[in-house]
Image (cartoon, rainbow, N blue to C red):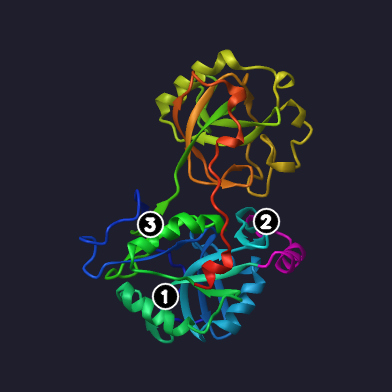
């Protein structure tokens, strides 16, 4: 492989902002808005039949997605370097497509036979949103409006059938605001804004990201100790959270990101709630300490092999308010952020009915726009 831009390359990153920004004053040519895809960030390096897929942290993804390697050979320019996202889409019962991050995670598997099977059962797609090189030319130092024009020219033949796609863009903040609200129904993560005059800056947070943010009142069900915790200086690492459904406390995610001082205070504060696992609502899951049915607390997954996922059960008496961005099935998509204790809330009143459900939207409409 001999390209104008060679791996390893760290992708350009984004910093979070609240709300769709006004382009005025941010860039002389304005901003380009695009959907924020919820998948694996991926740089595609293609030189003829040679194709390499690299992750956000420059690790190889090529072996896990043989169907995308084949698609890149067939659908992408002969020699190019593209920045984009790998995703898996599944049809729901209503026939509308939606991004499924959990299904995508399952594609990272050590067994070649499993990789081949999943490539057929849950094939992935790739959506391109930036251009680093085309032919013998590097586009890294060119402004985004030039990169986008060249990208549209190179990938304009692609359509919604995939598996390779070109993301849609708009320079209208009102359109971006609409996308922010309606595209979530197809599993997208928000909106990205790119300065039109900015070059491609590997590893730098020169883009802006607008993500969904919500709050929920949840039940404190347990905690895990921090990796630096010791018997002499115990520290809380994360809080295990639950919501009631049909009278049963379900595991909904974790909250973390505390200061060292707060971790120590929490450990002392929560000791009075510690109970034997047999007296805890999740005690019935003790038998599942190796398998991971339904992503129950304390169980292993492909992403947590070798990690200590044991937890200290607490009487489910305390309620806290957390900030979260989105749901993935029955759980928070990412780590939730602690906001405050809610002593005024009854734990049994904390159910899934309080969670905002985005209006369903068909992924095909996002890709075909």
Nearer the observer, 286 or 320: 320
Query: Does residue 121 show up magenta in the picture?
Result: yes
| Residue found at the far top of this picture | 272
In the rendered structure, the answer to whether residue 337 lies left or right of residue 30 reads right
Residue tagged by mark 3?
14
Where on the picture, by quarter, is residue 21? bottom left
Check disc 2: other Cα within 10 Å, few if <14, some if 14-19, many if 20+: some
| Image side of residue 190 versus residue 40, left or right | left
Disc with the residue nearer the chain's start (3 vs 2)? 3
In terms of depth relative to the viewer, which is nearer, 363 or 67?
Answer: 363
For mark 3, does the 10 Å Cα neighbourhood hold few (<14), some (14 to 19), or many (20 or more) residues? Answer: some
Q: Secondary structure at mark 2?
A: loop
Mark 1 touches mark 3? (CB < 8 Å): no
How many residues crowd mark 1 within 10 Å: few (<14), some (14–19), many (20+)?
many
Distance (Cα) linking label 1 and label 3: 16 Å
328 vs 339, left or right, is: right
Q: Tell me which segment is drawn in magenta.
A: 105-123
The residue at which mark 2 appears reads as 106
**Callout 1: helix, strand or loop?**
strand
């Amino acid at each position: 492989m001999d390209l104008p831009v060679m791996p390893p390359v760290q992708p350009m990153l984004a910093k979070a902002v609240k709300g769709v920004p006004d382009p005025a004053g941010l860039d002389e040519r304005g901003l380009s808005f695009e959907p924020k895809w919820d998948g694996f960030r991926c740089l595609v390096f293609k030189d003829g039949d040679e194709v390499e897929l690299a992750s956000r942290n420059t690790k190889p993804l090529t072996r896990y997605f043989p169907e995308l390697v084949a698609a890149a050979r067939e659908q992408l320019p002969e020699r190019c370097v593209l920045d984009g996202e790998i995703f898996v889409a599944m049809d729901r019962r209503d026939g509308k497509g939606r991004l499924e991050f959990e299904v995508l995670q399952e594609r990272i598997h050590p067994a070649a036979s499993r990789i081949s099977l999943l490539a057929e059962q849950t094939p992935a797609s790739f959506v391109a949103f930036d251009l680093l090189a085309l032919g013998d030319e590097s586009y890294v130092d060119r402004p985004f409006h030039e990169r986008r024009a060249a990208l549209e020219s190179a990938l304009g033949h692609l359509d919604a059938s995939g598996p390779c796609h070109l993301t849609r863009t708009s320079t209208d903040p009102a359109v971006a605001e609409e996308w922010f609200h309606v595209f979530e129904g197809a599993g997208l993560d928000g909106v990205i804004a790119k300065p039109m005059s900015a070059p491609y800056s590997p590893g730098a947070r020169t883009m802006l990201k607008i993500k969904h943010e919500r709050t929920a009142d949840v039940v404190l069900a347990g905690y895990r100790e921090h990796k630096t915790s010791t018997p002499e200086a115990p520290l809380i690492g994360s809080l295990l959270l639950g919501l009631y459904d049909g009278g049963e406390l379900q595991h909904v995610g974790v909250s973390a990101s505390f200061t060292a001082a707060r971790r120590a205070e929490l450990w002392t504060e929560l000791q009075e709630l510690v109970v034997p696992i047999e007296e805890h609502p999740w005690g019935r899951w003790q038998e599942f300490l190796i398998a991971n049915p339904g992503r129950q607390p304390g169980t292993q997954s492909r992403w947590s092999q070798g990690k200590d996922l044991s937890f200290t059960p607490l009487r489910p008496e305390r309620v806290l308010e957390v900030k979260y961005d989105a749901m993935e099935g029955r759980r928070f998509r990412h780590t939730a952020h602690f906001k405050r204790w809610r002593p005024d809330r009854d734990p049994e009143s904390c159910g899934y009915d309080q969670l905002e459900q985005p209006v369903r939207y068909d992924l095909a409409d996002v890709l075909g726009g």
